Amino acid sequence: MGNNNDLDKQLIDIDKKIELLKNRNRNLIQKNQNRINKDERKARTARLIKIGALTEKYFDVYGVSADDAEELLKIFSSYVIAKKPDKFKSKKERTDKI
């Protein structure tokens, strides 16, 4: 009878360890996803800053408000889209042309 109690305790201990490992695994997966998301946000922020700086440089719009810059870009957007070289087009844009 005492042997069954020992086995039951061992099973309970094993179940607890399994649950702890599952929780640890979930936490590690979440931490990894958070790191990936953070890296993606950083890359996007850096890209947006570079594009903004290039827009200021090539359109000579230093100190212009965001609304005014948007208005200027809208003026040229249809031309740029129509004349965009293939290397800058998305895969969908290239296949739609066929």
Image: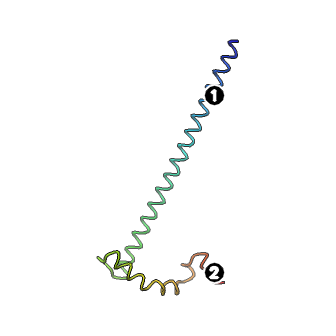
Is 16 left or right of 49, judged from the image as shown? right
Residue 85: x and y, percent? 54, 83
Label 1, secondary structure: give it: helix
Q: Is residue 97 above or below residue 28?
A: below
Q: Residues within 10 Å of mark 1 (few under 14, many from 20)?
A: few
What amino acid is found at the position of numbered circle 1 in the picture? Ile
Q: CA distance from mark 2 to mark 1?
A: 58 Å
Residue 22: x and y, percent? 59, 38
Q: Nearer the viewer, residue 71 or 64?
A: 71
- Which one is earlier in the sequence, the residue at label 2 or at label 1? 1
Q: Nearer the viewer, residue 77 or 51?
A: 77
In the rendered image, the quadrant that contains the C terminus is: bottom right
In the rendered image, the quadrant that contains the N terminus is: top right
Label 2, secondary structure: give it: helix
**Residue positioned most to the top:** 1
**Residue positioned most to the left:** 63
Is 82 left or right of 11, judged from the image as shown? left
Residue 66: x and y, percent? 34, 74
What is the number of the mark on residue 14? 1
Classify residue 15 by image quadrant.
top right
The residue at the point 42 percent across, 85 percent down is: 75
Classify residue 11 by image quadrant.
top right
Residue 9: x and y, percent? 63, 21
Q: Which residue is mark 2?
A: 96
* Picture mark count: 2
The residue at the point 55 percent across, 39 percent down is: 24
What amino acid is found at the position of numbered circle 2 in the picture? Asp
What is the number of the mark on residue 72? none
Q: Is residue 86 above or below residue 24?
A: below
Q: Residues within 10 Å of mark 2 (few under 14, many from 20)?
A: few
The residue at the point 56 percent across, 38 percent down is: 23
According to the image, what is the colour scheme of the structure? rainbow
